[in-house]
Amino acid sequence: MLSNLGIISSSISLLASLLLIYLSFVELKVSGDKIQKKIYKFSSVQLIFSLLSFLVLLIGYIFSDFSMINVYENSHTEKPLLYKISGTWGNHEGSLLLWINILVLFSFLFLFLNKNKNKNFKIFTLIFQNLLISIFFIFLLTNSNPFSPVFPIPGEGLGLNPILQDPALAIHPPLLYVGFVGSSIYFSAALAALISKVEAKSLATTLKPWISISWFFQTTGILVGSIWAYYELGWGGYWFWDPVENSSLMPWFLMTALLHSVLVLERRIGLYSWVIILSILTFTMSVVGTFLVRSGILNSVHTFANDPSRGLFILTFLILMVFSSIFIFFKYTPSEKKNYKIFSKEFFILINNWFMVFFLAVVLIGTLYPVFLDTLIGEKISVGPPYYNFVLAPFLIPLLFLMTSGPKHKWISSETKIFFDIILFLSVFLFLIIFFIIKENNLLINLILLFSIYLIIQNIFDFYENLKNRNINLSRIISHFGFGLLIFFISVNHIFSVESNFNVRVGEKKDIKNYIIKFENLETSSGNNYKSVVGYFEIFNKKKLIKENLEPEIRVYNQPKTITYEASINSNLFSDTYLTMSNISDSDIFNIKFQKKPFMNFIWLSVLLISLGGILNFFKRKKEI
Amino acid sequence: MKKIFIVLILIFISTKLVAAANTKDEILKNLRCLVCQGQTISDSNSDFANIIRSVVDDKIQEGLTEKEIYKFLSEKYGDWILFNPPLKNYSYILWFLPYVLFVLGGAILYLMIKKTLIEKK
Amino acid sequence: MKKIHLITTFAFLIFIFTTLYLSLNNRKIYNTKDIIGQKIDTVELTLFDNSKTFNTKEISNYKFTLFNFWASWCAPCRKEHKNLIKLSKNKNLKIIGVNFKDNKTQAKEFLQEMGDPFFILISDPKGKQSVNFGIYGIPETILVNEDLTILKKYIGPLDLKDVKEIKKIIKQ
């Protein structure tokens, strides 16, 4: 029953999209600057039925309707309600439906909320967006149908991988999807702007809120993903430079570049074509990321069920999208010859874009190079964290410096500011204090620390200025401040992290730096849908004379049958103690990974601050309109 | 402009000075667990990872350097096991392309502001 | 100028997309069977029956040596065992078994039940010795000549095709 309802409602939504494309082309020939009511109506119908189809799947999951193959394969009656709900988008078909819903939602919101006077611009945007929607609906219905029925109806489902049963991961995909699928709307708008020759300022004001909001969601999505990896994967890391993580980072760099360059466009200083290129690239990178993740050509920690036909479909779509965008771009792009003054604000924004595109390039090269090498000459290599750290870390120094000094400059003017000021002096002073405390002798890390302190202090001063007169951009201050803190805390975390891997038996002790780790006891227990072995550990801090008790677990789940290693984390304000345990087969020895990770909570908080800037930027826009 | 150059020079010096990973855990972090999905040896709980961990332990005891350990393992298991791809004929592009692109980006940027630079002089 | 931009962009993208397309059909799980041609390390291995050792240098006395890594707990090893027995009848070939992370009593039972094809049996209770041979899962089989050069690696159980191939190589 639900199965049919789902197929019917998504088909109606597809039909509405096709009709919208047709009506829009008709509308282009009608004079007048008001869009016909009919288009608004069809857009509403499209949204309602697309949401309905999502609701159908959601209900299927909540009530465990195993007549749908998708529910049967990914759910189980004994699963907690939250994970039944999140199971809806925890698989390929369901997440594709979520993807489409976001495309539709953004199409609808753009049509209803956008105040741009240029009718053709709005209509063309609608056409492009609905082309995307139709193609993805066809993909959904022909290849990846979440509503496919199964007969005879199974009595019980196969269950969801236990490591995916986590509150952070429940909200991670929707956040990330609003982020990078949301970028589709400025992809469509950019192409539409070229064809309908929208003027610079008007394009900028139209794009800005969409960029801010998708950037905000992308940032929080990445954050939540990191938090999940840290707590659930049990390795104590939060960023692995894994291909799947990289796929979420690549559009983020471009969104960040756009967020800045659109400011230049808004002031009619230039960058019209560049903003268009960035808008096209952002969504392209989102699709590239999806391709890499779903096609299975990458070897990643985050496994997704793969199917070559999906990869082929997404690749074909990507090729069509890229080539038609290039065609439109080269056909319609206006020529602009602008001069950018050195040391003006726009000059620093150009540098920001230079860096962002560079970061994107590094991540893209690192991710794709092994794939290309394997395909072209059959040589297999791995590109991992050491590569990215080596190539990217040095560039953080100029980036931090430019983030500090760039915003101090004025638009369209090349007066240079004094290089040495009180803030720099204060930063160096603070840095020296920290330097004598930590005694780190790596020059690179010291420079990164120094420049992140400079950025932090500069923004604290700016914030103070902002309280006095309200001319300064608060969202910028908060985001830059957050970024400074992020880099600072990541560096400090890196310096002070203690990590040790060792083997012990029950009852034994181990000395590691300032800690004594005692394996006190081992017990078996059982939970709702798993059995487990729990190790009881006491960690004694010799310096501070503090005892901590940690209980890592090895769980054996029955639905589906999987072994997970549950880390035991004692999270304090300033430092986390992290313990994982695994058994060495056919012995009574356990392998223990002990980690002391300082400032983890501050790292999360810094990213939260960064994204807060994005949402402030979004609401500030609203007020101006 | 001078200041920017100073900063750039500082960066490249600092790259060279990145301290070599010498602790066991840093070595383990740079090794891929062959039987896992992209996990490092340090992060994996598999049997294979446990064996490699104790072998690396032994090799450090024997006095092998970090590089020698990488060489030993890559001879046996291929470069696939190294997360830090060694600089070889087929990885030149991987290591140098980013810098080439960075300079190229800089050149484009320079062209964009060239006129004002000339005016200034 | 515009045309040159267009052509280079197109050429670049066609290259990227073609490679991505090819990579779709090129998905294999990584294995080490192509890592051949180099010599095996000189290491001291512990014999299964007593605490005496066997140095891999001694292999140079035999024309061809086949290292087989196995354990009684490994189901595919059971499957390939009859093929090893077949090969053990060949005079040109000495088979050295490496008992990988196994219980000795169970290993003995296994050989009693299935037959013993091994010329020499090595014990590797912690699996560390096998790392010298690049083993990452069992069964794995390595064919070595008198120069100690690795000629062939078989990941997973030996099948009849592999047996034929080994026989062909050692005939020369």
Image: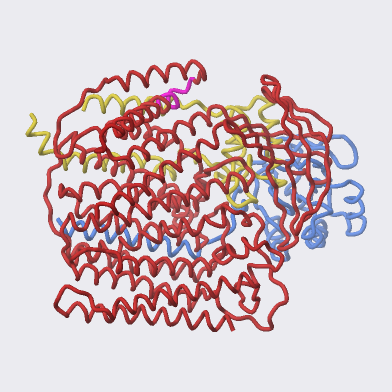
Residue B2 in percent (x, y) is at 22, 24
Magenta stretch: residue C170 in it? no
Q: Dividing the image into 4 quarters, which one contains the C terminus of chain A?
A: bottom left
Q: Position of residue A546 (x, y in %)?
A: 70, 25
Q: Taking the image as drawn, is residue A307 in sight?
A: yes
User: How many badges with numbers are in the image?
Assistant: 0
Instruction: Give above or below for A595 relative to A12.
Output: above
- Name the chief secondary structure element in magenta: helix
Chain letter, colour yellow in render: B
Residue for point 62% across, 61% down: A83
The reply to whether residue C132 is visible in this rendering is: no
Q: Position of residue A328 (x, y in %)?
A: 22, 66
The quarter of the displayed image where residue C81 is located: bottom right
The answer to whether residue B85 is left or right of residue C155 is left
Q: Hey, which residue is sitting farthest front in the picture?
A: A468
Residue C135 vs residue A542, the one in the foreground: A542
Residue A442 magenta-highlighted:
yes
State the image quarter where residue B62 is shown. Answer: top right
The residue under the point 51% across, 39% down is: B84
Quick one: which chain is blue?
C
Q: Is residue C94 above or below residue C3?
A: above
Colouring scheme applied when the structure was drawn: by chain
**On-image quarter of the N terminus of chain A:** bottom right
Residue range (magenta): A441-447
User: Which chain is represented by red in the image?
Assistant: A
Horizontal and vertical percent position of residue A294: 50, 63
